[in-house]
Image: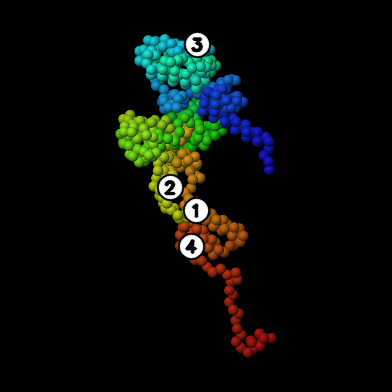
């Protein structure tokens, strides 16, 4: 039977809507001339529905025109430093404090400039603005006299090119850094105007402290009613579920936690409808898991030397009983280099490389919400890291009864304390993109290793259990069929024989308290008739 045309069109429209939303979450700035041109067409087609959803559920404005689409995303929390701006080059080095200052100064110079600008001219404007006494008092100096300063400016320009603010017309940044040439750019003013995502203009902020200035930049309007307060809480929770690898309950205020407890199903269902992310609910928090594994800026597991080191250190930390010192981690990296060095890059095996390897691994685990740094400098594992724990391997033949306490590493890692709400320890990571983390079986009945494998724990039975459960189900089916055929008066011997067969197939000893098996007979025996004893009786019987 064919599917009605209306259902086919509705399904296609829903798939396009979800693809457009995912594109905006992955790249908040989509350009008509770039790798996301097809996604921009979908965003323009569904602009009204997307604008309404983001405004209602996250408070993020969406601006769409013929050349670009800009989702004004603001983070759910302002205290997370684990996702900095990075170089557009292959190394993807994080931006330093000076590069952030140069980025702001370059944007200000471009706003005042013409439709085209040379890199040398841009550098002159930045140098003039950097001479501000307040910047000098803050320790920011920029004179273009050193090569590292020109490298910083080139990194800022490449980031603006990636965002679509600048478009190279002629020249090369490397030539400018070496002093052998210049570069000419077209300035995309429409993109430049929408680049800043803030509720208030920076010039209107009067606070002096850095944290207070950030809070004022993203502050909501006056929340003078319960409806507005609840809406602000819902938007904050939705932003954190979309942005953070894991939302831990202990990071929420009492009011936010109470609202999430009441509205958890509604909020997660709305996110799933928009993005296809699947809610993984545990005792400690919630992680929105991406089955397609592309809504992330940090991946784990990942190929390469650093990805391998990160995974091995995650396994080591997951088995630790408490915080681990940085010295112990570096010693562990040296031990891993001796064991797995044949698969690593040459530089990773050099003496002294363990410090950098450990730091990069810890930075990734922190960004994924799998670990936290203590004030003493130690590393403390978070609940989600348990999904990377490896238990003792148990090998048994198919059909053999499961030994209590035995199981695969995934099942052993899932055997964590039960939660009062029918869940247990959690934690993810990939923002998961990669949104990879969370550990323990619970309300969603997911194993800790499930997210890394992309399957759910309820479906992940061990081979032994599957082999044992199949004969039991078959035998039980036979019993039910026999009962349906013979009715409630089915013979007890037949029922007991079927139950015995089922228990033997499942590897379980037959209950010795069962009623002894009786010999079944279709015709019960009758006592013989009395024999005649006198001649008269025999004669009467013959006649």
Question: Could you tell me which secondary element the residue under label 2 belongs to?
Answer: loop
Mark 4: secondary structure: loop
Query: Do the numbered discs 2 and 1 sit on residues whose CB atoms are within 8 Å?
Result: no
Q: Is residue 408 above or below residue 81?
A: below
Q: Is residue 221 visible to the viewer in this orientation of the structure?
A: no
Residue that numbered label 3 is attached to: 113
> Which is more N-terminal, label 2 or label 4?
2
**Tag 3 or tag 1, which sits nearer the N-term?**
3
Q: Position of residue 350 (x, y in %)?
A: 33, 33
Q: Residues within 10 Å of mark 4 (few under 14, many from 20)?
A: few
Q: Nearer the viewer, mark 1 or mark 3?
A: 3
Q: Please rate how many residues cluster around mark 2, counting C-alpha atoms within 10 Å: few if below 14, some from 14 to 19, many from 20.
A: some
Q: Is residue 491 above or below residue 228?
A: below
Which residue is found at the position 50% from the left and 15% from the top? 184
Q: Marks 4/2: CA distance?
A: 35 Å
Q: CA distance from mark 1 to mark 4?
A: 26 Å
Dots 1, 3 in contact, CB < 8 A: no
Which circle marks residue 408 in the picture?
A: 2
How far is disc 2 from disc 1 in space, using C-alphas?
A: 15 Å
Counting residues from the N terminus, which is met first, the one under dot 3 or under dot 4? 3
Please give the name of the residue rendered at 46% of the width and 26% of the height, measured from the top-left corner: 76
Q: Is residue 180 at least partly visible in the picture?
A: yes
Secondary structure beneath label 3 = loop
Q: In the rendered image, which residue does mark 1 sit on?
A: 467
Q: Are marks 2 and 3 in contact (CB under 8 Å)?
A: no
Q: How many marks?
A: 4
Identify the residue under disc 4: 514
């Amino acid at each position: 039977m064919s599917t009605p045309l209306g259902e086919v069109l509705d399904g296609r429209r829903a798939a396009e809507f979800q693809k457009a939303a995912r594109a905006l979450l992955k790249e908040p700035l989509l350009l008509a001339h770039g790798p996301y041109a097809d996604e921009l067409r979908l965003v323009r087609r569904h602009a009204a529905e997307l604008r309404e959803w983001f405004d209602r559920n996250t408070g993020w404005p969406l601006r769409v025109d013929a050349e670009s689409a800009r989702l004004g995303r603001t983070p759910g929390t302002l205290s997370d430093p684990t996702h900095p701006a990075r170089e557009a080059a292959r190394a993807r080095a994080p931006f330093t404090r000076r590069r952030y200052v140069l980025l702001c100064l370059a944007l200000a110079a471009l706003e005042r400039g013409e439709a085209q600008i040379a890199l040398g001219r841009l550098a002159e404007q930045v140098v003039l603005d950097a001479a501000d006494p307040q910047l000098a008092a803050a320790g920011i100096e920029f004179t273009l006299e050193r090569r590292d300063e020109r490298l910083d400016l080139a990194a800022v320009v490449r980031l603006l090119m990636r965002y679509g603010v600048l478009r190279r017309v002629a020249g090369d940044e490397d030539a400018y850094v070496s002093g052998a040439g210049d570069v000419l750019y077209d300035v995309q003013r429409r993109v430049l105007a929408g680049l800043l995502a803030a509720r208030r203009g920076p010039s209107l902020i009067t606070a002096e402290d850095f944290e207070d200035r950030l809070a004022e930049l993203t502050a909501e309007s006056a929340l003078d009613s319960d409806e507005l307060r609840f809406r602000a809480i819902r938007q904050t929770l939705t932003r954190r579920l979309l942005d953070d690898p894991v939302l831990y309950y202990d990071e929420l205020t009492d009011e936010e936690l109470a609202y999430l407890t009441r509205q958890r199903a509604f909020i997660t269902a709305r996110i799933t409808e928009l993005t296809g992310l699947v809610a993984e609910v545990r005792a400690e928090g919630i992680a929105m898991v991406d089955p397609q594994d592309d809504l992330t800026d940090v991946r784990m597991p990942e190929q390469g030397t650093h990805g391998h080191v990160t995974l091995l250190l995650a396994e080591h930390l997951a088995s630790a009983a408490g915080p681990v010192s940085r010295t112990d981690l570096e010693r562990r990296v040296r031990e891993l280099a001796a064991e797995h060095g044949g698969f690593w890059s040459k530089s990773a095996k050099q003496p002294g490389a363990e410090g950098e390897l450990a730091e990069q691994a810890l930075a990734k685990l922190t960004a994924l919400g799998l670990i936290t740094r203590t004030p003493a400098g130690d590393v403390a594992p978070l609940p989600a890291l348990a999904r990377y724990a490896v238990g003792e391997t148990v090998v048994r033949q198919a059909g053999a009864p499961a030994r209590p306490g035995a199981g695969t590493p995934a099942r052993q890692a899932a055997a964590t304390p039960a939660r009062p709400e029918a869940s247990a320890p959690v934690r993810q990571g990939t923002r998961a993109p990669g949104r990879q983390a969370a550990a323990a079986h619970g309300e969603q009945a997911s194993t800790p290793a499930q997210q890394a494998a992309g399957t759910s724990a309820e479906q992940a039975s061990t081979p032994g259990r599957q082999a044992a459960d199949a004969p039991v189900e078959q035998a039980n089916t036979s019993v039910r069929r026999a009962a349906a055929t013979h009715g409630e008066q089915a013979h007890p011997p037949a029922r007991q024989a079927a139950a015995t067969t089922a228990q033997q197939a499942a590897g379980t000893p037959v209950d010795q308290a069962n009623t002894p098996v009786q010999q079944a007979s279709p015709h019960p025996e009758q006592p013989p008739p009395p024999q005649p004893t006198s001649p008269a009786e025999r004669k009467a019987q013959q006649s």
